[in-house]
Amino acid sequence: MQVRDPEKVRNAGPLRLRSLTFYHKQITLIMAEMDHRVRAYLAHIGRKGGQKSHRTLDPETARRMVAVREARRAFRRFHAACFWSYRKDLVIGAQDVPWVAEQLMKHGNREAWQVAHRLCL
């Protein structure tokens, strides 16, 4: 995209004008018409990407993924209170979720205990 003076491009032929407000100043952008072959190609690869990235998870795998994400979040959130003796960049995996819950219940306050309880469900 190019930025040009709108007065110079009024009779530019197959170009489209789009205006954009940037820091309270109106800027006119010139966009060339996209070739129909390019448009069709981009539409085709867009559909293909959506089909390839679509995956289905069984409920148990989805629950494990959520538990790992919540355990990682709890580890970062309560690091100073419960996990101070461990590295901050410790990688928490699925096998570590019960350990994180145990440490939260053992060394944490009421809020940490509630988070641990949710991890155990």
Image (cartoon, grey):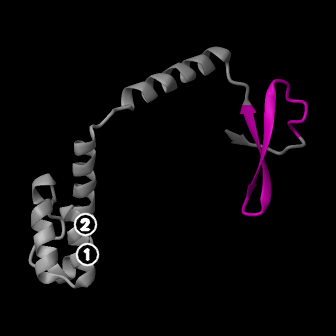
Disc 1 + disc 2, Cβ < 8 Å: yes
Q: Quadrant of residue 110?
A: bottom left
User: In the drawing, does residue 23 fall left or right of residue 120?
Assistant: right
Q: Quadrant of residue 38?
A: top right
Q: Is residue 90 visible?
A: yes
Q: What crowding class fits label 1: few (fewer than 14 Cα within 10 Å), some (14-19), or many (20 or more)?
A: some
Describe the element under mark 2 as helix, strand or loop: helix
Q: Which residue is mark 1?
A: 114
Q: Is 24 in the magenta?
A: yes
Q: Position of residue 54 (x, y in %)?
A: 38, 31
Cα distance, mark 1 to mark 2? 6 Å
Query: Vertical placement of 43 versus 3: above or below?
Result: above
Amino acid type at image mark 2: Arg
At which x and y percent is residue 101? 15, 69
Q: Nearer the viewer, residue 44 or 34?
A: 44
The span picked out in magenta is 8-31
What secondary structure is found at the residue carrying circle 1? helix
Q: Which residue is mark 2?
A: 118
Q: Please name the residue shown 27% across and 42% down the image.
A: 59
The residue drawn where x is 10% and y is 71% is 102
Would residue 43 appear left or right of 30 to someone viewing this image? Answer: left
